[in-house]
Image (cartoon, rainbow, N blue to C red):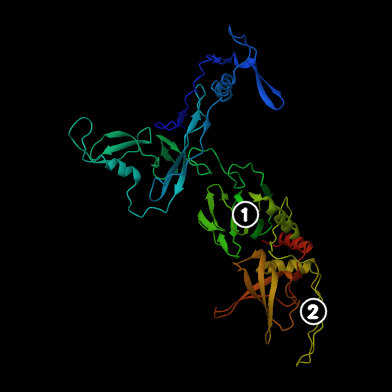
Amino acid sequence: MRHPLDQGQVTLPPPAPHPGAPGCCRSHRILDCAQLVPTAQMGKLRWREEERLAPGHTGRPRPLRNLLLLLWTLLNCGLGVNAQGPGEWTPWGSWSRCSSSCGRGLSVRRRQCVRFPREELCWGDTHEYRLCQLPECPPGAVPFRDLQCALYNGHPVLGTQKTYQWVPFYGAPNQCDLNCLAEGHDFYHSFGRVLDGTPCRPGTQGLCVAGRCLSAGCDGLLGSDAREDRCGRCGGANDSCLFVQRVFRDAGAFAGYWNVTLIPEGARHIRAAHRSRNHLALMGGDGRYVFNGNWAVSPPGTYEAAGTRVVYTRVTGSEETLRAAGPTSEDLLLQVLLQEPNPGVEFEFWLPRERYGPFQAEAQAQGWSLRQPQPREVDPQSPESPAAPTVIPPRTPGPTPDPCPPCPDTRGRAHRLLHYCGSDFVFRARVLGRVRQAQETRYEVRVQLIYKNRSPLRALEYVWAPSRCPCPPLALHRDYLLAARRLISPDGTQDWLLLPHAGYARPWSPAEDSRVRLAARHCPL
């Protein structure tokens, strides 16, 4: 883009030819210069004149004449008087101050083209504009275009002595002309171009420069075509990140929250979608739900999570989508709240190359298929190997001489089916603490995956066993599949999760996970 007033071209005057050698270079052809052949003898430059000598010449060129001829040849032939290429730019000058005192504006820098006669103009622009962002303007500040229209208030226009009050008019074809509407009248007048740095329209990102509406590229230059790639690099080629695109297809035989995928820190261009009566749910790194958590359906809208804005939409036809530009500042967990069989949840995001390896290792360590993730909790700590069936440790005799009796055998499909169908809650949990009281034992557990629930469960719960010697006992820092019942006191002041004696409490393993899912299909409706 060339500035209309300052073309920035500097033409150097041609060097004056020597009187004794007129017309050395004519019509873009070097005629006589080609006949001056330099040769080297004993380290000194000597010129042979192969032209016919003028009458009366002694055959020996005079040193002064040869020196002048050499200088003239270098100036006319060596410095490019007849070159056909473009000139050369001077270095860019410094950036000017921002055109605005608040909000968005622009600054400009300039350069000049240096060229000899017959050289072409330099290729490129004499001016370069960049966006400058200052603190937001205070409330009530008059917009820049309004100020420009107000300059003509009270001044005669249109060849009459009548004056008007002017306000901006945005219905004209060229939005970078100063089109102003006469207040109280049905006409507008164009006062030429707006000043550089004027917003093209309210609420848009473009700025007017030399009568054109330009937007800034990712390099901050107005009119630039530079764009961020999917990895967030300006002008990149998507080669510093990897594209993760998968479909979560677990059938989902029962209602509850199912883990879909971990969205690692640094993810960009996140998208998830499905078509069903189920609901997407998003959990932050602190264990709190961003939306659709605790069995409560949130309204569509924009939510703040992990340093980015998450746009959650739900339209008629049972279609839900989740979108976020990123990058995320912490891990997020994407879940689906199943109310009917899962037809598939599609998700995708771009991940930096250095983060893809840990993400893949975490998925594999949790037993999460990379092609078809299973609904298992992603534990930020290093995973433990599946626990073997718990063996009751020997107890040290205490004040009470009676030891805990052995627990009855609770193995088998019938026992699993009985407790799964007859319980109010079935979930996977990790035991965090244990307190033995007079006639009961209280476990503090962290809920990791819900298979069945008749009311919402919190991330941390207490599970009560009605004995100091619960059967089966639960070991600390192990993962279990638990079937519990809800017990409410007669006065309604106490609400317990009760683990029945000899109930269903199995150490979690992939095999037991599959068995409990199968049991869900055989419960009577």
Image: 390 above or below 43 = below
Q: Are marks 1 and 2 in contact (CB under 8 Å)?
A: no
Element at label 1: loop
Q: Which disc number belongs to residue 314?
A: none
Looking at the image, can residue 279 be seen?
yes
Crowding near the residue tagged with mark 1, few <14, some 14–19, many ≥20 C-alpha atoms within 10 Å: some
* Residue at the disc numbered 2: 407
Q: Earlier in the sequence, mark 1 or mark 2?
A: 1
Q: Residue at x 49, y 33 (%)?
A: 125
Residue 348, x across and y down, in percent = 64, 48
- Name the amino acid type tagged 2: Cys
Q: Is residue 388 above or below residue 402?
A: above
Q: Residue furthest left?
A: 161
Res 266 label: 1
Number of on-image labels: 2
The image shows residue 97 at horizontal and vertical percentages of 42, 46
Percent coordinates x, y for residue 88 in the rendering: 53, 31
What is the secondary structure assignment of the residue under circle 2? loop
Q: Residue at x 23, y 31 (%)?
A: 158
Q: Amino acid at mark 1?
A: Gly
- Whole-angstrom CA distance, mark 1 to mark 2, is 49 Å
